[in-house]
């Protein structure tokens, strides 16, 4: 990711920062080169936040927004777009779908709600490139993904034999090759048992 | 020393074999040997060595001849032509990577184009059936490791997907199929005596165009009802025997091809096939899969679903939202009604595969081909822009016929100055934004995009 340059002044919003016990005070936030600073020059881009909440971007720790299972939903439901999609205006791209939004609608909607990060909580390891491709095409928000281990045949075999170190080594390898952020375990042994 | 590159993906059919080994020359410029691939895949790699491969765009001149022009000139002409058109049609994408498919979506949106892929003339009817009836499918790995009964309905992998049978469907030994071919019962449903049919234990040589009746007869027998003595030219006993084989399978796998999607019944045939799959799951495990043709023809179905929500026939001419209605917004129908006023053919050959009347209509308007090689479409084009070959001198993600994404490698250096599809589309998009005095909508991740910001740098590289 390239560095963010320039100065921004967010003026007149209700600032919320629990860590510093700031609870809705009206004030200004100055940003320089991507970091919050005491003050910025007159050349700063001014954003009028009057009447709005100014806070750190929201973090959604568990969501299903990218990858094969949501894309099957998009593909299977052309009717989810008919009369249910937003109307695109510059400078945004088209935003399609309602119950299963396109990656563009997903990014824009999360940003509108004040989110900055979303965790895709189920990445099938074999489909990892698909998940990363969708993350790549999702605007504005940051995303990461958790590889699914719940019904993983190798994990179940290792655990059955009591080989804990092999289990750990296998999980570590899979996390690395899928560029996973953490381990997702759901309904262990549920489908393949 | 020549280098052996392993785990290379093959840029030919929907099996997207990823076990190819390629021996390349020391300077990374020539392919010397290709191991493991079928004869067609092998030749596709060797095509990259061809010294006559186009290295510059070629534009049609008033006297009908083609003249080489620079990339910036070609990009400028393409951007202006597409912006001037009321309804351009962008078609192809069977043979390029997903990065290109994502990049072209920006151009399509900007120019209010119709975006379509080769599914429109092959597995489009399968999509329609999936919309109506779902798609109880699996991966090719599951087919290899579990299937003990394999049905090839209207497809001939021995010719169309040469390594499909040895890697996944007839011969390989898998986890629950350790005896390989010995353990598998093969049914072939085909009006022709194909090489796949010759391998089958039962060949149902049905009357051509009567697939729906036969699917219906299978379902009727499976539900315990009587059928006429002969259905679709197949004897009642043969149908009952075949249904028994499928019913008694531990895991039944149905592969279907264009013998189903492009014969009488079309999407209704696939609808019936999916219903048969569902019915069989009352007795055993059964799964179904479309035999997709090109190595990444499953790709646009995925990429455009996550961008626009539709897999093909995507009309963006409204400018505000996408609209899909095959028959109305499908390439051949649009061309036959002469409803598009600019045609862009990318990584496919509409010149060879569209009906001649459709090509004649398209030829009345600006006709652009983007392809690494000369083909029938490039030779009738007003502008031919060469690009790198995805899977040979350009890496990228492709989707196998079971929608499993595979990271393809580049095995040799690309031709100097020749961009990838993605780079070319990004440059055309940038030019369109310059011409319309609008801000390009790059995604955050696009800040580290590959292409140089200065177009002329491409030609000097």
Image (spheres, coloured by chain):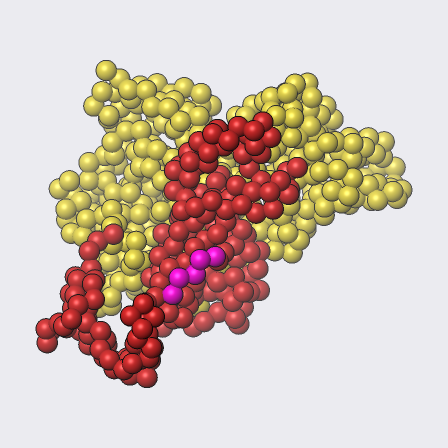
Chain colours: A red, B yellow
Which quarter of the figure has residue B56?
A: top left
Q: How many marks?
A: 0
> Principal SS element in the magenta part?
strand
- Residue B360 lies, with reference to residue B84, above or below; the image says above
Residue A52 location in percent, x, y?
A: 33, 80
Residue A18 location in percent, x, y?
A: 34, 70
Nearer to me, A82 or B120 = A82
Q: In this view, does A36 lie to the left or right of B178?
A: left
The quadrant in which the N terminus of chain B is found is top left
Residue A183 location in percent, x, y?
A: 47, 44
Nearer to me, B106 or A43 = A43
Nearer to me, B415 or A3 = A3
Q: Residue lying at the far bottom in this picture: please name it.
A: A51
Q: In this view, does A52 lie to the left or right of B152?
A: left
Residue B194 location in percent, x, y?
A: 63, 26
Residue A7 visible in the shown view: yes
Residue B304 visible in the shown view: no
- Residue A105 lies, with reference to residue B295, above or below; the image says below
The structure residue drawn at horizontal position 38% and vertical position 38%, both measured from the top left corner, is: A176
The structure residue drawn at horizontal position 37% and vertical position 24%, both measured from the top left corner, is: B6
Q: Is residue A47 left or right of residue B38?
A: left
The structure residue drawn at horizontal position 41% and vertical position 19%, both measured from the top left corner, is: B35
Q: In this view, does B453 lie to the left or right of B40?
A: left
- Residue A133 lies, with reference to residue A152, above or below; the image says below
Q: What stretch is highlighted in magenta?
A: A58-62
Which quarter of the figure has residue B263?
A: top right
């Amino acid at each position: 990711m390239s560095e963010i340059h320039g100065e921004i002044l967010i003026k007149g919003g209700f600032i919320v920062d629990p860590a510093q016990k700031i609870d809705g005070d009206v004030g200004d936030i100055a940003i320089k080169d991507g970091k919050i600073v005491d003050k910025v020059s007159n050349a700063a881009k001014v954003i009028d936040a009057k009447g709005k909440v100014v806070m750190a971007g929201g973090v959604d720790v568990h969501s299903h927004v990218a990858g094969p299972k949501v894309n099957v939903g998009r593909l299977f439901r052309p009717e989810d777009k008919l009369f249910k999609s937003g109307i695109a205006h510059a400078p945004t791209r088209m935003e399609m779908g309602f119950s299963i939004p396109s990656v563009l609608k997903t990014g824009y909607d999360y940003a509108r709600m004040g989110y900055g990060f979303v965790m895709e909580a189920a990445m099938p390891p074999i489909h990892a490139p698909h998940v990363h491709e969708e993350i790549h095409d999702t605007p504005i928000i940051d995303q990461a993904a958790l590889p699914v281990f719940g019904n993983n045949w190798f994990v179940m075999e290792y655990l059955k034999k009591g080989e804990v170190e092999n289990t750990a080594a296998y999980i570590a390898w899979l996390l690395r090759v899928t560029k996973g952020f953490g381990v997702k375990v759901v309904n262990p042994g549920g489908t393949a048992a | 020393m020549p280098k052996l590159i392993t785990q290379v993906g093959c840029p030919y059919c929907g099996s997207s074999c990823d076990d190819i080994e390629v021996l390349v020359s020391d300077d990374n410029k020539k392919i010397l040997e290709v191991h493991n691939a079928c004869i067609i895949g092998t030749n596709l790699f060797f095509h990259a060595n061809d010294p006559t491969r186009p290295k510059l765009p070629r534009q049609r001149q008033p006297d009908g001849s083609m003249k080489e022009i620079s990339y910036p000139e070609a990009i400028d002409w393409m951007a202006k032509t597409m912006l001037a058109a009321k309804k351009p049609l962008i078609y192809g994408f069977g043979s390029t990577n997903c990065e290109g498919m994502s990049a072209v979506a920006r151009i399509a949106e900007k120019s209010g184009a119709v975006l379509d892929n080769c599914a429109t003339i092959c597995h489009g009817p399968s999509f329609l059936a999936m919309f109506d009836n779902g798609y109880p499918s699996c991966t090719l790995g599951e087919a290899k490791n579990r299937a003990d009964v394999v049905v090839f309905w209207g497809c001939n992998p021995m010719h169309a997907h040469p390594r499909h049978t040895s890697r996944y469907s007839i011969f390989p030994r898998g986890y629950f199929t350790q005896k390989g071919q010995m353990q598998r019962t093969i049914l072939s449903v085909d009006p022709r005596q194909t090489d796949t049919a010759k391998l089958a234990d039962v060949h149902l040589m049905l009357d051509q165009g009567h697939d729906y009746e036969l699917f219906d007869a299978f379902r009727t027998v499976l539900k315990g009802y009587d059928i006429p003595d002969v259905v679709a030219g197949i004897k009642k006993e043969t149908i009952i025997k075949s249904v028994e084989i499928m019913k008694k399978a531990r895991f039944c796998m149905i592969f279907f091809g264009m013998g189903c999607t492009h014969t009488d019944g079309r999407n209704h045939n696939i609808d019936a096939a999916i219903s048969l799959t569902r019915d069989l799951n009352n007795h055993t495990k059964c799964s179904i899969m479309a035999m997709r043709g090109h190595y990444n023809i499953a790709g646009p179905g995925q990429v455009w679903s996550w961008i626009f929500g539709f897999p093909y026939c995507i009309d963006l001419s409204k400018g505000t939202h996408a609209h899909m209605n095959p028959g109305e917004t499908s390439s051949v129908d649009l061309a036959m009604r002469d409803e598009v006023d600019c045609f862009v053919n990318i990584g496919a050959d509409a010149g060879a595969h569209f009906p001649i009347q459709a090509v004649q209509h398209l030829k009345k308007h600006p006709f652009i081909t983007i392809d690494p090689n000369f083909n029938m479409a490039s030779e009738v084009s007003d502008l031919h822009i060469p690009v790198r070959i995805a899977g040979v001198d350009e890496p990228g993600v492709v989707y196998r016929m079971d929608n499993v994404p595979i990271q393809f490698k580049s095995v040799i250096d690309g031709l100097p100055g020749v961009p990838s599809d993605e780079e070319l589309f990004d440059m055309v998009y940038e030019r369109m934004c310059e011409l319309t005095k609008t801000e390009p909508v790059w995604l955050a991740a696009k800040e580290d995009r590959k292409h140089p910001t200065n177009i002329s740098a491409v030609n000097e590289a």
